[in-house]
Image (cartoon, rainbow, N blue to C red):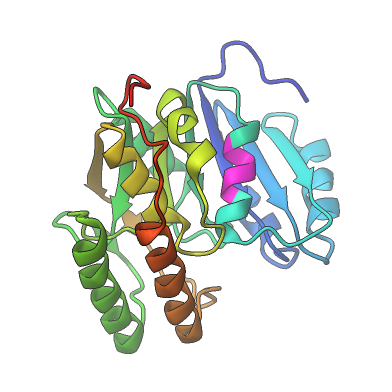
Amino acid sequence: MSVPADFQYSLVIPAYNEEHRIRELFDRIDRFDGELIVICDGDDKTPDVVETIAATRPDLAIRCIRFPHRLGKGGGVLAGMHAAKTPFVGFFDADGSTSVQEMVRLFSLLGSSDGVIGSRWVGGSVVTIRQGILRRLESRGFNFLIRILFGLSYNDTQCGAKVFRKRALDAVLPRMRATGFEFDVELLWRLKRAGFVVTESPVAWKNTGDSRVRSSDMARMLAGLIRVRFTKDNGEGDATGNP
């Protein structure tokens, strides 16, 4: 479907094999004055479910994009960002850990910033159901390494609730390499290197108990980020496009 000219926002939803919970996500959306782009790259019936929902919810602008092969979490988000045509683009998880209402609030905070990322680790955040202690320790350790490797001062790079100005994304997406769960870190790093301003905001979040990130993924994420960080890239420019 075409995007109505008055739409300002697009939300990308990576939906790899989400047929059993994607309907619940849309059932909780009473209203969204923008486009919802669902990226389906699995081998289950998720795209069929999404297209059925789209047909029965004319009040929502839902676009389902199918891929015949696995893109990875970051690859799915990248595909949605490339497909978005609105001035403001965000992404959030299909598990419903962050609500659409919360994403709308993040959009409203953009102001003069080029991006706003939700954080579970700053004052004012509301985490109704927390992750287990081991996952939280892993998260803090990963964040510490990210600060050392990339010089990013954010408290939470991995929260699946982020919004950006499309012009900022368009400036850095061609250089993106990561397609896994490490995608968020590379995106924030490249935006920083290009001179864009991304701020961190408290977020309302709940642990769904069905995270797609496993402990074994942490090592792969770190290895992927080391490759990104230390692979020479002479093409980086500033926010104006100058070298």
Question: In which quadrant of the rendered view does residue 164 lie?
Answer: top left
Residue at the spot x=51%, y=57% of the render? 178
Taking 14 as reference, is 156 left or right? left
Say if 143 sits above or below 194 in the image.
below
Q: Which residues are magenta?
A: 77-81
Residue at the spot x=49%, y=29% of the render? 170
Taking 44 as reference, is 3 left or right? left
The outermost residue toward the bottom is 134
Residue at the spot x=24%, y=71% of the render? 145
The C terminus: image quadrant: top left
The N terminus: image quadrant: top right
Residue 180 in sight here: yes
Q: Residue 22, how many percent across, how many down?
A: 68, 58
Taking 225 as reference, is 10 left or right? right
The outermost residue toward the left is 123
Residue 159 in sight here: no
Say if 107 sits above or below 135 in the image.
above
Say if 30 sits above or below 189 in the image.
above
Say if 137 sits above or below 174 in the image.
below
Q: Residue 130, how many percent across, how many down?
A: 33, 75
Q: Residue 168, how many percent across, how many down?
A: 40, 29
Residue at the spot x=47%, y=56% of the render? 183
